[in-house]
Amino acid sequence: MKNHYILPKNPYNSLSEFYEEKGEALAYARKMSAQDIIVELKASLLRGRGGAGFPTGLKWYTLFQDQSPKKYVVVNAAEGEPGTFKDRQIIRKNPYSMIEGALIAAHVLKCNEVYIAIKKSFVTELAILQRAIKEFKKKGHLNKVSIHLVAGPDDYLFGEEKALLNVIEGIGPFPREAHYPPYEKGLFSTSASANPALVNNVETYSRVPEIILRGAESFRAIGTENTPGPLICTLSGDIKRPGVYEVPAGIRFQDLINEYGEGPVGNSPIKAVLPGVSTGVLVRENFDVHLDHASMESVGSGLDSCSFMIFDETRSAPRIAQEVAKFLYRESCNQCTACKTGLGISSISLDALFTENPDDKLIERAILGAKSAPQSNRCYLPVQGSILIPNLIRNFEYEFRDLLLNVGNHKPVLLPFIVDYLEDRNEFIFKNAAMDKDRPYEQDWAPEDKNFMDRGTF
Ligand SMILES: Cc1cc2nc3c(=O)[nH]c(=O)nc-3n(C[C@H](O)[C@H](O)[C@H](O)COP(=O)(O)O)c2cc1C
Ligand code: SF4
């Protein structure tokens, strides 16, 4: 496998097999000073793969500079974005890079506790992680550091980093106040110590070992100046060959869908693509965009988690907007009133568009509701709605207008919530999220739920 690529053709069966192919980055890194590791990481220009693309070296440096006596390393393996399966695919095929990345972070921060937070429903991945961590222990890599495996709920907010820490603490998937980012208030903090936490995504940690072993320059040789290295993309929806693909950043989107996805599944051309639910839609005129943060932003979209949900011409854009609004509304947690209210107004207005003789003010209400949602918001979720819902309406305004005139085909669509991936068949298994929650989420985290959380300390 090429250097810096982390998804092998066949899963690694053991840590030794992984070391044979990829080398022993952890042992190498442990001989390096924390400063030298950070210099290399900063020079690599690695950007977080959890969605926002934050510079990883800078994040590690901030935590490294902190004087707190106790720090934590946390792996965000919650993977809750609709249409993504990349983190689970990494764990299935190569859990070792991620664990090594987290242990390198622990070495840099002189921290002796690593938490891996993952959904309890990801049973396959939980079992793989348990096995892999035991291998690290057997090799003596965990003599001075423990790894805790925490299994959390299915809620989308579990993946939000401040909610993730609250889940680990047994409080539930509720984001903390915005002024408590993980580097300010980490895990089990007390008045005496903030115990800051480094939170990174599965793919982000997985990129670290080879950057340290082979050097920043070789990493930057892949991808673009703005977004170096490979990216792992999930292609789902109206595409012939759905799947999880590791590609160099900067690849043209058109090439990704034609060369990897083999183009649209039917006779209809692709109309719209959502790269997640926090950024603008990618429309046909922009399919020649390069997949890096800057290029995607220049066309009003973003890389997000590279979970490309593909919709062809037969899909109704108002139905897509309806599903996005419903999802964000249901998953918002009601801690900040404007968020729930605004997303509720938007979602209910979009639902009402599909009733007989819809009022033409509904479109405006859907936009205004979404735009009013982020007020005193603890987390980014309502901002996502305020970006994507108006963006879909603006891009496909004619379809919304048609709807008011009862024109057009507006069959319901579903967002792809992937529960399994059969790689040899290029097939995803989906669940209908709407069936899981038949009412908006309330603060009903039951204390007994905590019992399933601990999946072991190693
Ligand atoms: C509503 C919401 C859900 C999120 N879900 C995830 C998730 O499932 N996995 C993830 O890695 N990041 C998720 N994030 C982003 C995290 O808050 C955080 O930015 C990320 O873990 C940082 O990792 P990175 O710097 O490696 O990208 C979510 C953010 C929000 C607002
Ligand atoms: S902004 Fe919305 S989702 Fe985030 S914490 Fe507040 S109510 Fe919950």
Image: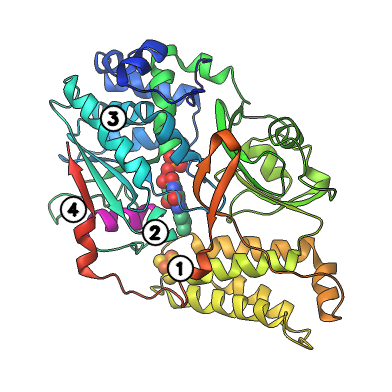
Amino acid residing under circle 3: Ala
Amino acid residing under circle 4: Ser
Residue 312 in the image: x percent, y percent?
77, 53
Q: Do the residues labelled 1 and 2 touch (CB within 8 Å)?
A: yes
Q: Which of marks 4 and 2 is nearer the N terminus?
A: 2
Tell me the quadrant of the picture where the C terminus can be found.
top left
Residue 56 in sight: no
Q: Give the residue displayed 43% in from the left and 20% down from the top.
A: 211
Q: Name the residue under label 1.
A: 436
The Cα–Cα distance between marks 4 and 2, rounded to whole angstroms, is 25 Å
Q: Which of marks 1 and 2 is nearer the N terminus?
A: 2
Respond yes or no on whether mark 1 lies under 8 Å from ligand 1.
no
Residue 222 in the image: x percent, y percent?
59, 20
Q: Nearer the viewer, mark 4 or mark 3?
A: 3
Vertical order, 17 against 405 (above or below): above
Vertical order, 190 against 242 (above or below): below
Dot 4: what SS? loop
Q: Are marks 2 and 3 in contact (CB under 8 Å)?
A: no
Q: Which of marks 1 and 2 is in front?
A: 1
Classify 10 Å Cα crowding around label 2: few (below 14), some (14-19), many (20 and above): some
Dot 2: what SS? loop
Classify 10 Å Cα crowding around label 3: few (below 14), some (14-19), many (20 and above): many
Numbered tag placed on residue 152 in the rendering: none
Q: Do the residues labelled 4 and 2 touch (CB within 8 Å)?
A: no
Q: Name the residue under label 4.
A: 189
What colour scheme has been applied to the protein in the rendered image? rainbow
